[in-house]
């Protein structure tokens, strides 16, 4: 039993060593492997024969003559034309489009572009106030607390809408803004009271959502679209004369 | 001028510079193709294809050993030819014999005959190896490349080079023992 175990161990050792003999011949083993091989070669005649035959084979290969080619392989083709690859251009274009889309969606999320175009009839009113609106554009910042998306959940009447707009005014940066906004809101309120018309001809809903910044009251002042969406089920439509957006209050 | 300067000029479209590189390396490339494919005609075709491919793709050469890069292209061209042969076998690989040209002038006629016979047997033995082992043995023991250069040509690790070389040599040795080229020794399992 011990003999067979020893024989098996010896066989495994020979097998492991033979895997290293080729590299040992080329001096490609590290120091540890080299010592292991040399120790084994001292005690194993079979592995000594193995390495001998391998070395003979390598020496025979060294003696294989180098043939001279019968002809020259010089190239006669004209200069290769650099192939234009569309991929770099496509990559750049894709990156630009990707950045643009990210910007667009982020801006849309923060309602930087405002809401839809005003109805035809009110376009004049909106334009007359556009100067003031542009001046106010930079003064407003998205205020999530005053965001109408988190606003009144129940059906809104006009007074509640007025209160909401006044809360926006209160979030302005200085007194001047608040006065301007308050004045504007009073005007808006008066107009709201007198005008509750159904949007028959024009389309007051924002289309696409892409608007120049500050064109409709500044970023984040109102979220008419969200307000309008909440009121979508109602038939009556209200339009803001200041900004031109339409929505349906309860 | 060394290779890198010719390579740079070749990248700029200087065909003459590229043909200087061809002149320097065509013997090595041809011999590799010859030992891989086993006959002169196939070796010439493969070598010409390899140089054409190198010229067309010189822009993709990123530095390092131009010789290794060129031999890599040559090896790939040879593999393509071998694949075609497998699909459309015309002649068995083992019957293709490289008849040495350019016979050495030194030595006795008997030496000449022995060497010729040896060359033929070795070529037949190489033909029995899998292409990767054959390539490793040719690059190392006939072309004299180092393990690192072989790894670059074959685009593999040093460990893989070691393994393919070990198996290729053992297999060739077994073939030569069977043919009686040298006395029977312990053969690999």
Image: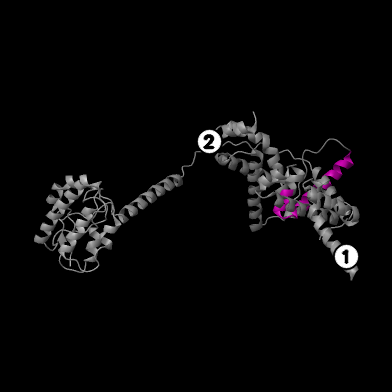
Q: How crowded is mark 1: few (under 14 residues within 10 Å), some or many (20 or more)?
A: few
- Locate the N terminus of chain B by quadrant: top right
- Locate the C terminus of chain B by quadrant: bottom right
- Under circle 1, the secondary element is helix
Horizontally, residue A212 falls left or right of residue A39, namely left
Q: Residue B45 carries which label?
A: none
Residue A189 x %, y %:
13, 58
- Under circle 2, the secondary element is loop
Residue A27 x %, y %:
79, 45
Of circles 1 and 2, the one toward us is 1
Tell me, yes or no, whether the highlighted magenta stretch contains residue A213.
no
For the residues tagged 1 and 2, is the chain the same? yes
Say which residue appears at 85% left-offset and 62% top-offset.
Answer: A11
Taking the view exactly as shown, the residue that stands out farthest to the left is A194
Q: Looking at the image, which is closer to me, B6 or A245?
A: A245
Q: How crowded is mark 2: few (under 14 residues within 10 Å), some or many (20 or more)?
A: some
| Mark toward the start of the polypeptide (1 vs 2) | 1
- The answer to whether residue B151 shows anywhere in this view is yes
Determine which residue is flagged by label 1: A6
Residue A244 occupies quadrant: bottom left
Horizontally, residue B177 falls left or right of residue A116, namely right
Principal secondary structure, stretch drawn in magenta = helix
Numbered range of the magenta stretch? B108-136
Residue A62 occupies quadrant: top right
Residue A231 x %, y %:
21, 66
Q: Which mark is residue A79?
A: 2
Cα distance between the residues tagged 1 and 2: 69 Å
User: Given the image, what chain letter belongs to the residue carrying mark 1?
Assistant: A
Residue B43 x %, y %:
68, 45
């Amino acid at each position: 039993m011990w003999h067979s175990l020893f024989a098996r161990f010896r066989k495994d050792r020979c097998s492991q060593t033979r895997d290293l003999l080729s590299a040992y011949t080329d001096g490609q083993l590290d120091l540890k492997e080299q010592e292991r091989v040399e120790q084994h070669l001292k005690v194993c005649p079979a592995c000594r024969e193995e390495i001998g035959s391998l070395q003979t084979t390598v020496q025979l290969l060294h003696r294989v003559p180098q043939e001279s080619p019968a002809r020259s392989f010089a190239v006669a083709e004209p200069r290769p034309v650099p192939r234009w690859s569309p991929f770099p251009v496509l990559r750049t274009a894709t990156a630009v489009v990707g950045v643009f889309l990210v910007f667009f969606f982020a801006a849309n999320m923060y309602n930087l572009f405002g809401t839809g175009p005003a109805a035809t009839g009110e376009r004049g009113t909106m334009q007359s106030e556009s100067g003031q609106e542009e001046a106010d554009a930079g003064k407003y910042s998205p205020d999530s607390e005053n965001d109408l998306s988190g606003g009144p959940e129940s059906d809104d009447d006009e007074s509640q809408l007025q209160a909401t707009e006044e809360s926006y005014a209160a979030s302005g940066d200085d007194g001047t803004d608040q006065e301007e906004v308050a004045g504007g809101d009073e005007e808006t309120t008066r107009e709201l009271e007198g005008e509750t018309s159904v949007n028959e001809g024009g389309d007051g809903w924002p289309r696409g959502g892409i608007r120049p910044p500050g064109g409709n009251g500044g970023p984040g002042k109102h979220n008419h679209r969200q307000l309008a969406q909440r009121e979508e089920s109602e038939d009556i439509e209200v339009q803001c004369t200041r900004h031109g957006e339409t929505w349906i209050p309860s | 001028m060394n290779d890198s300067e010719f390579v740079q000029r070749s990248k700029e479209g200087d065909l003459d510079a590229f043909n200087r590189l061809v002149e320097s390396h065509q013997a090595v490339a041809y011999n590799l193709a010859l030992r891989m494919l086993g006959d002169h005609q196939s070796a010439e075709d493969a070598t010409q294809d390899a140089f054409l491919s190198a010229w067309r793709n010189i822009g993709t050469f990123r530095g390092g050993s131009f010789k290794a890069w060129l031999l890599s292209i040559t090896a790939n061209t040879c593999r393509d030819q071998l694949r075609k042969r497998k699909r459309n076998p015309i002649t068995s690989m083992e019957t293709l014999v490289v008849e040495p040209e350019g016979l050495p002038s030194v030595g006795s006629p008997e030496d000449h005959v022995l060497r010729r016979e040896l060359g033929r047997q070795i070529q037949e033995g190489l033909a029995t190896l899998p292409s990767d082992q054959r390539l490793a043995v040719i690059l190392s023991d006939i072309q004299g490349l180092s393990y690192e250069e072989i790894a670059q040509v074959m685009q593999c690790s040093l460990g893989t080079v070691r393994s393919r070389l070990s198996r290729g040599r053992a297999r060739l040795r077994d073939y030569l023992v069977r043919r009686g080229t040298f006395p029977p020794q312990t053969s690999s399992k």
